[in-house]
Amino acid sequence: MARFSNASPIRWLGLGGAVVPLLMLLFVLVTLIIKAIPALEYSGLKMFTGTTWNFGAQYGTPVKSYGLLHDPGEEFGALPEILGTLATSAIALIIAVPVSIGAALVIVERLPRRLANWFGIFLELLAGVPSVIVGLWGVLTFGPFIAHDVAPFIADNAPSWLPFLKGNTGHGQGLLISGLVLAVMVIPIIAATARDLIRSVPILPREGAMALGMSDFQTARKVTLPWVGAGLVGAVVLGLGRALGETIAVAMVCGVALGSLPTNLYADMITIAANLVQNIDTAILDKMDISAFAALALILLTITLIANIVARLLVRRVSGTALPVGRGL
Amino acid sequence: MAKNFRLVFTAAALVPLTVLAAACGSSTPSSSSSSPPTSSAATSGKITETGSTLLFPLFGYWQSGYKSVAPSVSMTLGATGSGTGIADAASGLVNIGASDAYLSSSDMAQYPGLEDIPLTVAALMVNYNVPGISKPLNLNGTVLAEIYTGKITSWNDAAIKALNPGVSLPSLPIVTLHRADSSGSTFLFTSYLDAQDPSAWPSTNIGTTITWPKVSGQLAETGSGGMVSGCKATKGCIAYVGISYLAKTSAAGLGEAALANKAGKYTQPNSSTIAAALSSFGAPPSDGAMSLINTSAAGGYPIINYEYGIVKTTQPNATDASLIKAFLNWVVTTGNTSTYLSKVGFQPLPSAALSIAKSQISAISG
C-alpha cells in the first residue's frame, strides 16, 4: 500500500470505482420510491390484497389524483403478481435444490476425474445459456411436452385432498411450466456452486465416516453436506435471486393472465416481471400507470432483498454448527 | 514493473466511470446535426423513428424508397410499440413516433405540443382455424364478445349457425387467442366489440392491454407473428391479426372472417371495402384524431384505422423541422402509392385526410 502513498489521484479513482455500485443501488431505490408514491397512495393496501389490474380507459376523460393526471378507471391490485413471483420461485427451488445437490455429490464423489471435469464445464455452459433461449425452448418444446405427457399423469394420480394438483391440465403455459423453466435455469447455478463447496470438504472426515461403517448416503448427509451447510444456503439463495428476478423466460411461458390467481397448478398466471415486460408499452404514456409499475418494481426489489437478508441470517445460524467434529454422530 | 501496475490499476478504476458517463450520455436527445441551419430546405441529416410494430415494416420500405429521393438523409427506425413511440416523440428522443392510435385527450394534456398526423390506413382481420370451412364465416361483435367472454364455447353454437345459414359447422371447442403484450391490435379489436354491442363488451374493457375475461383454454400470444403461429397450431382457434400479416395467415391456412358493420352487412377487408368505410366517416377533424371503427356504410369493412406519425410541432432546430416535413410530405404522397402500401396490405389516405395531414405537416417548425 505504501507504494501508492504518493499517488493520490489513483487512490481517488479507486475509491470512486468502489462507491459507484453503492450509488447506483441508492439511485435506483430512491427513484423507485419517489415514482411509486402516487400509485401507493392511490391504491393503498389494495396494491397488496387486490386481484384486479386495470390500466384505465385510454380514451376516457382524464382525472387527477395525488398530483398526477391519469386515465379513469385505473386499478392496481398486485396480489396475483406477487403470489405468482413467489410461487414460481418456490416450485423452481423445490425441484432444483435436491437435483443440484445430488448432481454435485455425484460429480465430486462418483465420477472419474476426467469425466467430472467435462461435467463441470457442461454445467457452467448451461448456467450461461441466455434466458430467452430457455424461454423459447419452454414455449416450443418443454411446455407442450409437460402439458401432453406429464401434467395429465400428475392430475390423474394426485390424491383428492390436493385439489390444486387436479383439474384442467392447460396448454403448455402457466404456473407449473414457469416453475420448471426456472428450475432449469437455477439448477446449474446451485449445482456449480455446490460442486465447488463439496470439493472443498477435506477427505479425512469423510474417510473417518466411511471407517465407522457409514454408507455413501450417510456420509453425504451427516458429514459432507453439514460441513458446507452455510455455503449451500448461499448457493440456494443465489438460485432464488435468479428465479425471483427472471423476466423474459417466465414472461414467455406464464400465460400472462393479468389479474388472475391460478386456480390450479397448470393454470395461466402472471409474475411481477412478466407484467412489467409485456405491458410497458401500455403503461408508458400514463404517469399513474408508470407509478404503479415503479411500485411493482419496488415490491420485487423488496422481495429479493428480504430473501437475501433471511439467507444471511440462515447462513449465520447454520455456520455456527457447521463443523460436525465432536457433534456426536 | 510498478509503473505498469499503476497504469493497469488506473485503467481498471476508469472503466466504471466511463460506463457511467456513457450511460448518462445516451439519454441526450438525438438532434439531427450539429451544424447550423444553412437553408430552409435541408437535404442532409438524420431522422429518427420509434413506435408501432405494425407500421415498422412499412417504414422500412419508405426508408429505402426515400433514399432515392434524398440520398444524404439517413434514418434509424425502431419497433418499440406505439406507446413508447409517442413517449419518445414527446420527450424529444426521436423525431417521429409511429402509433396505431390517435392521441387521447389524456395524452394531449400530459404531452402538450404533440400532433398526430394520419400517414396511411390499416385494417385488422379476425382469423380462425376451423377445418372444412371454405367460405368466409360471418361474425359480428355480439358473437365475438360472447366468444371472448366464454358464453359461446363451440363452433357449432346456435348463435354462429344463425349468422352462417347453410354452413355445416363442426362441433369443435373454440380456443380464444389474445395478445400477451400491449398492442394496438387489442385496442382496435376491443373497440369494435364495444362499438357493436356495448352490453356484451363494456367500454371499460377497451385498451392496448386489458384484463381478459376468464375463458377455458384461452391462449395469450406475443406479437402478431405469435398470433398466427399459435392459431395455426391450435384447431378451433380464433384470433385478431393486423392486415399486414395477410400473406402469413393465408400461408398458415387460416380462415378470414367477414365481419358485420353497423349496417349489419358482412365484409372482408380489401381496397374497396376499406375505401367504402373511409368515405362514410368523411374528413377527420383538424387535429387528425378520428376513430374509424364500425362503419355505417353497407359495403364498408368495420375495423380500420389511421396509422399516425406523432411529431412535436416545435422541433429543436430548423434543420430537423425541414427534414421531417420533407420526409412526411413524401410519405403521404409518394409513400402512399401501391408500390409501398401493397406490400403490407395498407390503403392510401383519402383526399380529405391527405389535406388535413398536409396542413398538420406544414405546422411543424424549428
Image (cartoon, coloured by chain):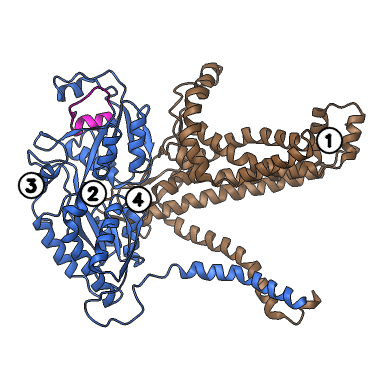
Chain colours: A brown, B blue
Which element carries disc 2, helix, strand or loop? loop
* Magenta stretch, residue numbers: B130-147
**Disc 3 crowd, CA 10 A, few/some/many (<14, 14-19, 20+):** some
User: Looking at the image, is mark 2 or mark 1 nearer the viewer?
Assistant: 2
Q: Nearer the viewer, residue B291 or B229?
A: B229
**Amino acid at circle 4:** Thr
Quarter of the image for residue A192 reads top right
Left or right placement of residue B348 versus residue B227 in this view: left
User: Looking at the image, is mark 4 or mark 3 nearer the viewer?
Assistant: 3
Q: Which mark is residue B280?
A: 3
- The Cα atoms of the two marked residues, 1 and 3, are separated by 82 Å
- The Cα atoms of the two marked residues, 4 and 3, are separated by 30 Å
The image position of residue A217, as x and y in percent, is 79, 28
The residue under label 1 is: A223
The residue under label 2 is: B343
The residue under label 4 is: A282
**Amino acid at circle 3:** Ser
Task: Say if mark 1 contacts mark 3, CB within 8 Å.
Answer: no
Let me know if residue B142 is in the magenta part.
yes
Q: Nearer the viewer, residue B61 or A233?
A: B61
The image position of residue A204, as x and y in percent, is 90, 39
**Disc 1 crowd, CA 10 A, few/some/many (<14, 14-19, 20+):** many
Whether residue B212 can be seen here: no
If the image is split into quadrants, where does the N terminus of chain B sit? Answer: bottom right
User: Looking at the image, is mark 2 or mark 4 nearer the viewer?
Assistant: 2
Q: Nearer the viewer, residue A310 or B61?
A: B61
Q: Who's the residue at 36% across and 52% down the image? A: A281
The image position of residue A7, as x and y in percent, is 72, 80
Q: How many marks?
A: 4
Q: Who's the residue at 28% across and 22% down the image? A: B154
Which element carries disc 3, helix, strand or loop? helix
- The Cα atoms of the two marked residues, 4 and 1, are separated by 55 Å
